[in-house]
Amino acid sequence: MRMVRLFSFSALFFLLSIVVIPAFAQQKELPSPSLQNIDQNWLRQVQRNIGRSEYFIQWQENVSAYQSPNRAQSLRFTYYENGFKAQPRAGGDEWQAEFRLKTIDRGEKELPIEKMVLTAEENTLKASNSDFDIHYRNDEKGMRQDFIIKQRPNGRKTLRLNFATILDRARLNVNADEIVVSHKGAHDSNVMRYTNLKVWDATGNGLRAWMEKTGDMSFAIVVEDKDAVYPVTVDPLSTSPNWMAESDQGTAYFGWSVGTAGDVNGDGFSDVIVGVPLYDNGENNEGRAYVYHGSGTGLSGTPSWTAESNQASAELGISVGTAGDVNGDGYSDVIVGAYGSNNAYVYHGSGSGVST
């Protein structure tokens, strides 16, 4: 995990968390796989790695933006230079809500919301320019957002962060300490909270801060920072819902298909291929396959090769196995089935392992 040091300059920190109240989506039920022949310590390590990787924030070519699924909260986030969009992870004809930062000011000159540089690392994303940063962190508790103001804006009024929203089949309820997004559907249910605003300065003194509605599709975060000692932190109360939408689904279908891969890299040790047909990266239930190399000390806990379908509901990895040496080059090849797209794929082995 990368640690970001914020002690070399005066800065203003804003942290908000996203907590969701989703409707329970229908999930395809698959029978439990048989893993009796797999080393359980190795399996647990790999399950943790797979579950964690599903929360990574990654660039998706099909939308030309960074995205991350959040299986525990049943949400998918898309990230922009000045904000994010939230929608149900499974997609479909459902709600969407965008939160876009428009201005930062204290009554006079605004800080420019432009020339943002985006950098992603695992489950974090940083959008930065010379005046402020926006940090995102995606994990099982939700997606957390913080604002770091590097320069105090000119002016004598209270600090204001002004936001515009774009809503589709959703409505906004703005309160002083949280914003609730509700789905304008048959049951008009609450689906997401932007919540628990708390502020203190470098000395630990609490500062008054609140959210206020500024229009039908806009709101502001307001902070009384006149006597604050910088840096000032605005932080949520880090809580989880008292339920889980899909308990431990990050690895629930790991090992649905497990088989020998043969010796894909020609080192004399047998390798293993594993299918995860309901894996979610850029597309819901697109699926993924993993190859783990054998060695003199056993199987590696880190995959040497992965493949995903980049197609919603393709379920790549529903079946996996060795294909033998189909091209006669002396290396074992692998075959992977994608039930949802009616395809099977052969990947060739080589001296460095399975090719892409």
Image (spheres, grey):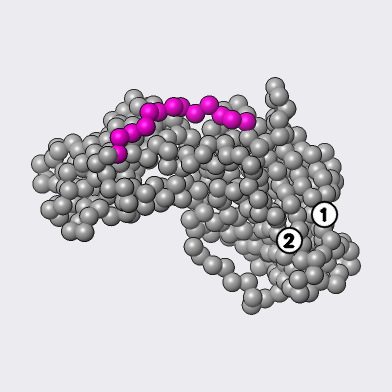
Secondary element under disc 2, as helix, strand or loop, is strand
**Residue 28 falls inside the magenta stretch:** yes
Q: Amino acid at mark 2?
A: Val
Give the tally of numbered discs: 2
Which residue carries the number 2 mark? 234
Q: Residue at x 55, y 42 (%)?
A: 72
CA–CA distance in space, label 2 to label 1: 10 Å
Which residue carries the number 1 mark? 210
Q: Residue at x 10, y 46 (%)?
A: 330
In the rendering, at what x and y percent does residue 320 appear? 27, 35
Q: Residue at x 57, y 36 (%)?
A: 245
Residue furthest to the top in view is 186
Task: Judge from the rendering whether residue 183 lies leftward or rightward of residue 307; answer left or right.
Answer: right
Q: Is residue 281 among the parts visible in the rendering?
A: no
First in sequence: mark 2 vs mark 1:
1
**Residue 283 falls inside the magenta stretch:** no
Q: Is residue 38 among the parts visible in the rendering?
A: yes
Task: Judge from the rendering whether residue 12 lies leftward or rightward of residue 22; answer left or right.
Answer: right
Q: Residue at x 61, y 39 (%)?
A: 243
Secondary element under disc 1, as helix, strand or loop, is strand
In the rendering, at what x and y percent does residue 146 appear? 67, 58
Majority secondary structure of the magenta segment? Answer: loop
The region drawn magenta spans 23-35
Residue furthest to the right in view is 156
> What is the quadrant of residue 161 in the picture?
bottom right
Q: Which mark is residue 277?
A: none
Q: Residues within 10 Å of mark 1 (few under 14, many from 20)?
A: some
Is residue 285 depicted above or below 165 in this figure? above
In the rendering, at what x and y percent does residue 247 appear? 51, 39
Looking at this view, is 193 or 169 the one in front? 193
Looking at this view, is 308 or 70 the one in front? 70
Quadrant, the C terminus: top left
